[in-house]
Amino acid sequence: MMEVGLAGPLLQVEDIHKSFGELEVLKGVDMTLDRGHKTAIVGPSGCGKSTMLRCINYMERPTSGHIHLDGELFGETRSGDRYTPMNEKELARQRAHVGMVFQGFYLWPHLNARDNVAIGPMKVRGLGKAEANELAEAMLEKVHMSHKIDEFPERLSGGQQQRVAIARALAQQPKLMLFDEPTSALDPELIGEVLNVILELAEEGRSMVLVTHEIRFAREVADHVIFLHDGVIVEEGPPKQVIDKPQHERLRAFLRQIVEH
Amino acid sequence: MIEDFKGFLAVYVENWSDWGPQIYEAVWVTIQLTIASFSLALVLGLLLALGKLSRIGFLRGFCTAYIEVARGIPALAILFLLYFGLVPLGIVFDAFTAGAIGLGMSAAGYIAEVFRAGIQAIHKGQREAALAVGMTPLMTFRYIILPQAIRIILPPMLNMAIILLKDTSICSLISTDELMLRAKDLAMMSFLPMHLFLLAGAIYFCLSWPLSLITRRVETMMQRGRRQTFGG
């Protein structure tokens, strides 16, 4: 474990820009996350919120700007003023500290629930099979999926798949959890079970960044809300302020639209 | 009619002590040739597919070109080139080696495309999820992408094996001492071409039929679900 950054914030996002060809999706965003804190990123479709999240663990390489995790420069190495992209192996080592939950779950269909969770710790951290299985069982219990431990993804509902995916990320024993619209692909009646699990994790004091459409949930789980519009942060602050007393017209319009839904 | 047929079969019985050992030996060469060329084609095909999917422009260009050329030239032309064409350069292969390499190089073009299609059929989220847990691209390919791709690839790959098994017969034209060449030689010596080519055909069929059965079996297993496929 790195002790280096314990004094500073867990995550620092500095002036991130991201373009896809001509299209500039992120136009300079900053954020800071302290240990144990939870930030929700909200905004209309196409505002860049998923891209921002994906830049944090370099699933997308930012066009410019820098990420620091736990005091360590992420995805790049620096000598003097020069930043060089990390090689894939180094990047993998850093990514192992960041758990990510995707909108589309992406469980591996050729592995059962236990192996989906256990394979990462086995291959990435070199845990033995018994130890990895034990870890997987503990993580699956955390997401209330112990009863489906031998099932393959195709036999699980969307909500169950997403809970296994959360267990898979937890098994990394990550410093930070990223959730990319974790309930957007779910049938309405399955959303609750996933949100409950995320809420339980939040209450454990885990650090997380969450992209979501569920405004009410964001208010409940997050201590900081970022409203992103057209690739810039338009408004941010505690949920009570941002969601209940929005200042900007665009944010008000966005919230009205969500409520009407 | 029935008497004719009996007479026809009697010829085999009569000649079997002569043909049998020779045919047996030649069948073994055919099997070895199939295994050798298929193994080469698998390894080469996988590398070509990875090259074609690579982000490195030069590698992608080379592999794409190889695949196109390999698919556009008759295997026989490659065999002739390897066996006769390289002699002036002082490169001399024996007929078996030239056959195995030539067929393998030719089939690799098709097999590369089978691999590529299988790999590309895997959703990119599968790869991202693996990278997100901290796997390197190599681990991701080995533990996440390939096991899924193989399920898609296996039936067309077995099909390729069947085609290759039958294509080994063209190695007779560079004098590889396999089933077809031996059947032809025996036919010419005995003046019994119908007997010998029927026999050769029957043997090819007996070798490829089980592969067809396995292919069909594998396809049904795929449809039944993933778990039964490899015992999960």
Image (cartoon, coloured by chain):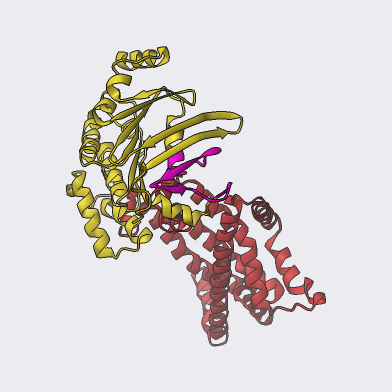
Chain colours: A yellow, B red
Q: Which residue, as the protein is rendered here, is positioned at the far bottom?
A: B17
Image quarter where the C terminus of chain B lies is: bottom left
* Residue sitting nearer the eye, B22 or B90: B90
Confirm whether residue B153 shows in the render: no
Residue range in magenta is A55-84
Q: Is residue B178 left or right of residue A170?
A: right
Residue B139 place in picture, x, y as percent = 44, 58
Query: Is B174 one of the magenta-colored residues?
Result: no
* Residue sitting nearer the eye, A31 or B126: A31
Instruction: Name which residue lies at 39% across and 36% down.
Output: A32
Instruction: Name which residue lies at 57% across and 28% down.
Output: A23
Residue A256 place in picture, x, y as percent = 34, 13
The count of marks equals 0
Q: Where on the picture, by quarter, is residue B177?
A: bottom right
Residue A202 place in picture, x, y as percent = 24, 38
Confirm whether residue B30 shows in the render: yes
* Residue sitting nearer the eye, B207 or B62: B62
Residue B143 place in picture, x, y as percent = 41, 57
